[in-house]
Image (cartoon, rainbow, N blue to C red):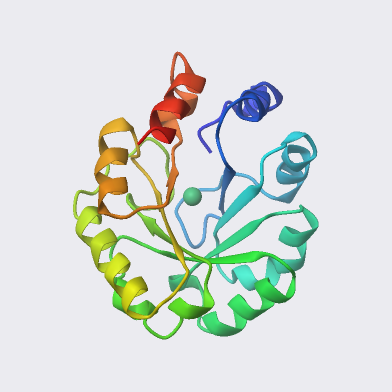
């Protein structure tokens, strides 16, 4: 979402050359979130040239409908929103059945305890640390407490889920988040808006 869409090949090449672990794709449909980003034709073009595993974050209504299309991209991880899935358990099963890792995402207002009965079935929990829809937003400070609560829930239930955060991540918030128990940092503007993106990726990797 934070890449230069007129120079996508250049930006993906930078990611390929970097120490980044994954490429995170923010899909927005203008229904579940108040913005539209890009869809499958763009992701197919990206998937062809990207050498990193794809972490697909669907900020869309009824995301389960697109499981096969996400799989066809060769995606490693498919993230769906708790708020967009009335039958979340079934959707997670579909994602696993398609051979992908399954992530569940929570908006800032959704408490972590709603995951009590699904946490053992997911590979990752993605906490939104800004309101989804736009890049470059300010980090919501309350997220640190939320990460700690999620970490405790994961421990309590012997779940193997990773904790990922998305929104307002930079060197400072990244450090606080890692200290609170985060496993995966998603960074947009901090990388693609930087003078030296490769160096900023290294900064986050060092946390
Ligand atoms: Zn995202």
Please state which of residues 140 and 76 is positioned toward the viewer in this rendering: 76
In the picture as drawn, the residue positioned furthest to the top comes out as: 195
Residue 182, horizontal then vertical, whole percent: 36, 53
* Image vertical order of residue 170 relative to residue 197, above or below: below
Q: Quadrant of residue 139?
A: top left
* Image vertical order of residue 196 relative to residue 190, above or below: above
- Which residue: 60% across, 53% down? 56
- Which residue: 70% across, 67% down? 67
**Quadrant of the rendering where the C terminus is positioned:** top left
Total marks shown come to: 0
Residue 165, horizontal then vertical, whole percent: 39, 51
- Which residue: 62% across, 58% down? 77
- Residue 75 placement, left or right of 140: right
Camera sees residue 175: yes
Residue 42, horizontal then vertical, whole percent: 72, 41
- Which residue: 31% across, 67% down? 150
Camera sees residue 138: no
Please state which of residues 205 and 136 is positioned toward the viewer in this rendering: 205
Q: Quadrant of residue 107?
A: bottom left
Residue 23, horizontal then vertical, whole percent: 59, 41
Q: Quadrant of residue 149?
A: bottom left
């Amino acid at each position: 979402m934070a890449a230069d869409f007129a120079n996508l090949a250049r930006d993906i090449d930078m990611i390929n050359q970097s120490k980044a672990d994954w490429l995170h794709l923010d899909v927005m449909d203008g229904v579940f979130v108040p913005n539209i980003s890009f869809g499958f034709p763009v992701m197919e073009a990206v998937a062809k040239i990207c050498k990193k595993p794809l972490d697909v974050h669907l900020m869309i209504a009824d995301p389960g409908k697109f499981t096969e299309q996400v799989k066809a991209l060769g995606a490693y991880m498919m993230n769906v929103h708790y708020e967009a899935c009335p039958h979340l358990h079934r959707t997670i099963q579909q994602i696993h059945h398609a051979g992908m890792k399954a992530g569940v995402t929570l908006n800032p207002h959704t408490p972590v305890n709603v995951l009590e009965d699904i946490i053992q079935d997911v590979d990752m929990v993605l906490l939104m640390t800004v309101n989804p829809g736009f890049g470059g937003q300010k980090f919501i400070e309350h997220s640190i407490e939320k990460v700690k609560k999620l970490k405790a829930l994961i421990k309590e239930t012997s779940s193997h889920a990773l904790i990922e955060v998305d929104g307002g991540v930079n060197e400072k918030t990244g450090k606080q988040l890692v200290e609170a128990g985060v496993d995966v940092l998603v960074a947009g503007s901090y990388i693609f808006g930087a003078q030296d993106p490769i160096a900023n990726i290294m900064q986050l990797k060092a946390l």
